[in-house]
Image (spheres, rainbow, N blue to C red):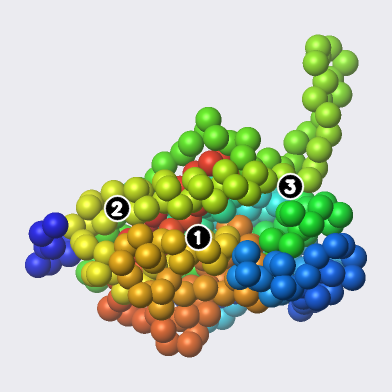
C-alpha cells in the first residue's frame, strides 16, 4: 500500500471534550460467585473481566445526564450552544420519551433537537457517524453525542453465561465544525442482519387482540457467544482494512485502535491480525466489563485524561456487535 504524504480530511471536525460516568457500585467476579456457579478463575481467562459497575438507583438518562454536564463544564460551552444531542443506547429509560429528550430537558439545552440511536455495541461509531454527517451538512455547528447503557436491567442474573459479561456506564463527546486540518479521515459501516439472532434482547409480547401468532415476552439478553466471537475475529478485520484503504493508511500509521470492549481475546486477535503491538489496542474491560455503546467513549475519556490520547494522533474507533453490525472510523485529532 502506498501511503499518502498528506492525509486528506473527509470531514473537518473537532472533538472539543470527552467525559464519562460510571456507577459507584462494583460487582466483582468473586461476588458473582456467591449468587451463581462461577468464579474469577473461570470468568477472567475467558473474557478479561474482573469487575463490572451496576446502578442501584439510577437509569440510563441519569448516567447520560452526568456525562452531558461534565462535557459542558470541561468545554466551557453553554447548553444553549448545542444544535443537537444524540444518545446511543440499547437500554433506554423508555421507548417514549426517548433518552436524548430526557437529557436535553435535564440540561436545559433549549435550542437543541435530540434523538436516540440503537446500534448496540457498534453504537459509538454509528453515533459518531450520524453526528459527523449532521455537522458536515453545514446546517449545524455544535453537537453532543453520548453512549449510555444500563445493561444490568437487560440480563438475567441467573444466567451465568451472559450476566458475567456486562456492566453499566456512559461516555460521550462534544463535536464541532472547524477550519483546522483535523477530523474524520475515513469510515466504513456494515450490517449483517441475516446473523442478527446471534444477539437478542428486549423482545416485546404482541398482545394485540387481532393478531394471529402471539410472540412471547422475553426481556432478557441472549447471545450465541461462539458465533459472535467467530464473527468478530473474522469480519471485523475486513472492515478495518476497508477503512484503512479509504484513508490511504497502513495499519502502522494508526497510533491507537480504540475497539469496543467486549472480550480481551477478541482484542488480542485483532492486534495479532494487523501485526500491531497489543499496547496499541488499550482495554478497560477488566474493570467495567462490556458496556455496549458506552465502552469506547469511556475508554477514550480515560485515555484523554491520562494523556495517552492527545492532538496530533490518528485514532481508529472500532465497534462490533448486535445487529449484527460493524463500524470503523479513523480520525486525525
Q: Nearer the viewer, mark 1 or mark 3?
A: 1
The crowding category of the residue bearing disc 1, from other C-alpha atoms within 10 Å (few below 14, some 14 to 19, many at least 20), is some
Q: Where is residue 41, by image quadrant? A: bottom right
Looking at this view, is 318 or 49 the one in front?
A: 49
Q: Nearer the viewer, mark 2 or mark 1?
A: 1
Instruction: Give the label on residue 221, or none.
Output: 3
Q: What residue is drawn where x is 86% and y is 54%? A: 158
Question: CA gap, disc 2 to disc 3?
Answer: 31 Å
Looking at this view, is 144 or 300 the one in front?
A: 300
Residue 206 to residue 292: above or below: above
The crowding category of the residue bearing disc 3, from other C-alpha atoms within 10 Å (few below 14, some 14 to 19, many at least 20), is some
Q: Earlier in the sequence, mark 2 or mark 3?
A: 3
In the image, 186: left or right of 92? left
Question: CA gap, disc 2 to disc 1?
Answer: 16 Å
Residue 196 placement (x, y as % from top left): 58, 36
Q: Quadrant of the N terminus?
A: bottom left
Is label 3 in a helix, a strand or a loop? loop
Q: Is residue 162 visible?
A: yes
Q: Earlier in the sequence, mark 1 or mark 3?
A: 3
Instruction: Give the label on residue 241, or none.
Output: 2
Q: Earlier in the sequence, mark 2 or mark 1?
A: 2
Residue 197 placement (x, y as % from top left): 63, 35
Instruction: Give the label on residue 266, or none.
Output: 1
In the image, 258: left or right of 50? left
Question: CA gap, disc 1 to disc 3?
Answer: 20 Å
Q: Quadrant of the C terminus?
A: bottom left
Q: Is residue 22 visible?
A: no
Of all residues shown, which one is farthest toward the bottom? Answer: 306
Residue 44 placement (x, y as % from top left): 66, 71
Q: What residue is drawn where x is 25% and y is 69%? A: 252
Amino acid at each position: 500500500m502506498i501511503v499518502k504524504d498528506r492525509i486528506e480530511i473527509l470531514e473537518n471536525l473537532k472533538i472539543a471534550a470527552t467525559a464519562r460516568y460510571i456507577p459507584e457500585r462494583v460487582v466483582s467476579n468473586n461476588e458473582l460467585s456467591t449468587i451463581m456457579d462461577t468464579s474469577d478463575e473461570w470468568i477472567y481467562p475467558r473474557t478479561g473481566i474482573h469487575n463490572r459497575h451496576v446502578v442501584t438507583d439510577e437509569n440510563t438518562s441519569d448516567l447520560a445526564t452526568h456525562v452531558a454536564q461534565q462535557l459542558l463544564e470541561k468545554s466551557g460551552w453553554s447548553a444553549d450552544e448545542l444544535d443537537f444531542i444524540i444518545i446511543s443506547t440499547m437500554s433506554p429509560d423508555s421507548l417514549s420519551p426517548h433518552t436524548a429528550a430526557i437529557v436535553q430537558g435535564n440540561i436545559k439545552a433549549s435550542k437543541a433537537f435530540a434523538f436516540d440511536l440503537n446500534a448496540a455495541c457498534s453504537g459509538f461509531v454509528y453515533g459518531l457517524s450520524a453526528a459527523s454527517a449532521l455537522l458536515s451538512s453545514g446546517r449545524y455547528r455544535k453537537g453532543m453525542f453520548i453512549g449510555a447503557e444500563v445493561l444490568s436491567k437487560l440480563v438475567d442474573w441467573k444466567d451465568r453465561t451472559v450476566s458475567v459479561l456486562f456492566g453499566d456506564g456512559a461516555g460521550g463527546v462534544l463535536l464541532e465544525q472547524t477550519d483546522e486540518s483535523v477530523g474524520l479521515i475515513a469510515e466504513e459501516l456494515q450490517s449483517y442482519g441475516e446473523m442478527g439472532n446471534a444477539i437478542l434482547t428486549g423482545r416485546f409480547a404482541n398482545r394485540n387482540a387481532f393478531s394471529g401468532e402471539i410472540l412471547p415476552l422475553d426481556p432478557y439478553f441472549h447471545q450465541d457467544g461462539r458465533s459472535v466471537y467467530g464473527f468478530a475475529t473474522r469480519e471485523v478485520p475486513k472492515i478495518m482494512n476497508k477503512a484503512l484503504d479509504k484513508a490511504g493508511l497502513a495499519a502502522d500509521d494508526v497510533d491507537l485502535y480504540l475497539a469496543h470492549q467486549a472480550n480481551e481475546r477478541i482484542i488480542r486477535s485483532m492486534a495479532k491480525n494487523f501485526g500491531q503491538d497489543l499496547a496499541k489496542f488499550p482495554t478497560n474491560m477488566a474493570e467495567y466489563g462490556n458496556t455496549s455503546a458506552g465502552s469506547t467513549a469511556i475508554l477514550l475519556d480515560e485515555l484523554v485524561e491520562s494523556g495517552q490520547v492527545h492532538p496530533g494522533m490518528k485514532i481508529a474507533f472500532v465497534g462490533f456487535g448486535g445487529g449484527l453490525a460493524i463500524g470503523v472510523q479513523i480520525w486525525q485529532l
